[in-house]
Image (spheres, rainbow, N blue to C red):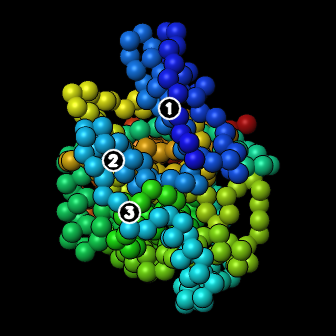
Amino acid sequence: MEFQLISRELPETDVADIAKTFIQPFELDQAPLFRAELATVSGKQYLMIDMHHIISDGVSISLLLKEFTKLYNGESLEPLRIQYKDFAQWQNAYLRSGSLDKQAAYWKKQFEGTVPVLHLPYDYERPSIQSFEGDSVHFTLDKEMTEGLRGLAKEEGATLHMVLLSAFNILLSKYSGQEDIVVGVPVAGRPHADLRNMIGMFVNTLAVRNHPDKEKTFKELLKEVKENSLQAYDNQNYQLEELIENIAIKRDISRNPLFDVIFNLNNIEYEVDLTLDGIELKQVNLENDLSRVDLSLVGFESGSEIHLKLVYSTKLFKKPTIKRAIEDLNTILTKVLKDSSIILGDIQLLNKDEEKYILNEKNKVSDLRNVEFSF
């Protein structure tokens, strides 16, 4: 395929408007499934790259930035031993060989019987057809909390991912009143060394099922999340699409099949400034207005902090609700750091002002009951 970088000068305008005109739908049968443009606006230059998700994942974006930097600075890239088409051929043969029968049996056992449907306190009635309109709220776990969470993970022989996934399960359980919850967890899907530096779509999503029963302690839940996560990782080659096709699940076009929430904490840091032979490139962050499920908690570690964002469907939630959810998640994390043996049922999400208000209201009702009325 021939590729040409488009270059054009534009009148003074907002960078978000430039991006909106640049990003267009792709035709899947017309290669290449990426485009790039260099736009000059009032002396500033914006390099825009758009790729269809079917040819790239999070690791691919990181690779693209690193390799672009090397080439611009006059360095050469090591040739790939195999191409993505080789991986695709191997994967198709692997799927047909029956080698995944054991993994298929594991996942089918996880979802035998009734598959739980998460019912969160939505602000709006769910549309009859799933909407992907979304927004997000960013937040950061500071140095003190990050160090505490890392220490807790080390103490319990778990990962930071497992600790945060446990806390997210508690939040979902508190909001839904349910104790059987499925969360989608993306995995890189690059088990072989030859795949580490290859651009392409390798990601699979694992449907991890946990039971944050209110009688359990946080340590007990974390142990369960750890065991379930490790088993899921061991069986990660079985594709989510295959699982959905092969279990008894009632399809509902108003929601995502199997799970309505996603958790993804990865080690890919996208917010990287690049230095290109004396030219400094800074990334311009544009809000992602897509929400593939009801709620997604995503983020990455950066030095002494953890950067997170809660992506939500704007057809289901208002922004104040999401901001409150972030406060409640922080409350959960603070309480489990203070006492990792706390019973889940004892974790209260009300702040002092709210508790005081409710107590006052209860006292008013109690006083009213003690009043004698005469007619």
Distance (Cα) linking label 2 and label 3 = 13 Å
Q: Pointers 2 and 1 in contact (CB under 8 A)?
A: no
**Mark nearer the N terminus (2 vs 1):** 1
Q: Which residue is mark 3?
A: 80
Q: Quadrant of the C terminus?
A: top right
The one nearer the camera, 15 or 42, is: 42
User: Disc 1 versus disc 3: distance between alpha carbons?
Assistant: 24 Å
* Left or right, 332 with reference to 146: right
Above or below, 198 relative to 30? below
2 or 3: tag closer to the N-terminus: 2
- Residue tagged by mark 1? 5
The residue singled out by tag 2 in the image is: 67
Given contact means CB atoms under 8 Å apart, are the residues at marks 1 and 3 in contact?
no
Local secondary structure at mark 1:
loop
Q: Is residue 321 visible?
A: no
Q: Nearer the viewer, mark 2 or mark 3?
A: 3
Mark 1, other Cα within 10 Å: few <14 / some 14–19 / many ≥20 = few
